Image: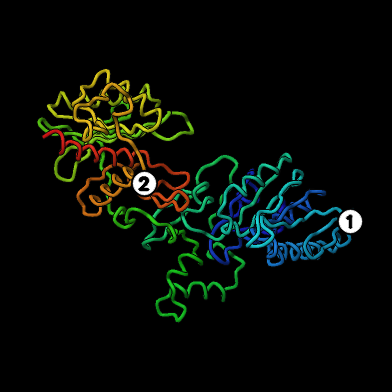
Amino acid sequence: MELNYTPHKIWKPFYVGDWDIAVLIGGRGSGKTWNAGNFCVLNTFANFGSRSLILRDVASSINQSILQNIKGRFIDIDEQSGNIYRNSYEIQENQIKNYKKETIIITKGFRTSRVEQQTDLKGFEDIDLAIIEEAEDIRDEERVNTLLDTLRKKGNKVILILNTPDLEHWIVKRFFDFEKTKADGYFKLIPKKIPRICQVVTSYLDNDFLPKRTKDKYSSYNDVNSYNYNPDYFSRSILGLATENQNILRKFDLNKIKTIKPKKQFETIEGVKWYKSPTAGKFYSIGVDTSGGKEDSDYTGISVREMSENYPVICQFKQRVNPDLTSPIILDIFKKLILAGGFPLIIVEAVENTGGTVNQALRTFINDDQYFYQRFDTDPNRLYGQSRGDVGFKSTSSSRNKIIANFSTLFNNSNLEIVNEDEIKEMMTFVWNEKKSKYEHMQGEHDDLLLADMICLEGFEYIMKHKS
């Protein structure tokens, strides 16, 4: 693409790079909208007949959209070229047509109004460029995915423009990693390395065309001596740093989680991370949350703790493995604890078929007194001992709430050791799901190791009741 000026270096990959999706994200005055509009106009002039689609969350706000910027750039470039394009394009209120009366700049909303349902986004198969602005307002990723699936023209491009939202926004999670900044609670976005994706993270400091007066005003929000001083506004809206979503109800205190320092395992055997050697004469609980092992499925989580102060972690495991491979991993851990002179108890989540399969395989090798029985209290003689269904941990609404509450109490009172980075991350993303009325992982995240650890702690209560 030919440019009649030299853009800031941060924008070079956007103009000359080979990408399918460009994500322009940052704070106010950073030039996101201007550069997207400029790209659209230059692309239109360079490729006669190309069609562009401009989208917002709500169609009724189109008049305040990037379309006004695009109209201005059409006029500017026409004047700079000696008005050679003047008769080639017709600028209308909500669209632009070429001299053949073909609409080349189309506007559309994902919704007709803020209270109405999604609009029909069919019929855009021949679009060359789609620009979605104020994408931070679109919290439903499926809406955008539906649009992307309709854009089938070879070589089409999509530009997402947004002010930096919170860390839970799907665009942030899909295209960026993040790191802490000196300001507590604010995070810098780091583009993920994804083929054919261009991410531009920018702020007013990268905009060479922003008037000095405006730059000074923006900087004053971070000046403690200025009447404009507002460090939160400066960090979020001006610099475009990401923050936590304040509406999320987390089970665990995020500030407390952030103080945890992960521990380095002293060895890893077949994916099992060992943090502490077992000790003779100690009781151990092996908590297991199983999975099917498929690439798009949950993980298998295994957590082993010792019954002593703060329930130290012995080892943990988190990988996608099928039930047939899960049983040997558990047996290897079990044997290591036995050889060290320990007294291990196995407790496997048994509601799903995968858990039942693992339980059935393990019972071939494990004695009954080394296995968790759900009905032990009411059935001390184990009259149903031969049925697969009475062994293992049954995850019902009440039993699930119980193990979550137990884990939370121990953690909040600093009576529980946490050492694994995977578990720390899962604790951060373990939130209340209003629709399901329960705590679980955020969309796109996992809680398999965390639940395995909660099940593990349930084993100690069982030990206290039945092993004395």
Q: Marks 1 and 2: which is nearer the front?
A: 2
Q: Where is residue 136 in the image (x, y as percent from the top left)?
A: 56, 58
- Residue 152 shows up from this direction: yes
Picture coordinates of residue 61, whole percent (x, y): 68, 65
Disc 2 target residue: 425
Residue lying farthest to the top in this orientation: 364
Q: Which residue is identified by label 1?
A: 99
Query: What colouring style does the render use?
Result: rainbow
Which quarter shows the C terminus? Answer: top left
Asked whether, in this view, residue 463 is left or right of residue 118, the answer is: left
Q: Which amino acid does label 1 sit on?
A: Tyr
For marks 1 and 2, the one nearer the N-term is 1
From the top left corner, tell me how far across and down residue 309 is, in percent.
Answer: 14, 44
Q: Which residue is drawn at 77% across and 62% down?
A: 94
Residue type of the residue flagged with mark 2 = Lys
Residue 268 placed where, x, y %?
28, 30
Residue at x-position 29% and y-position 22%: 362
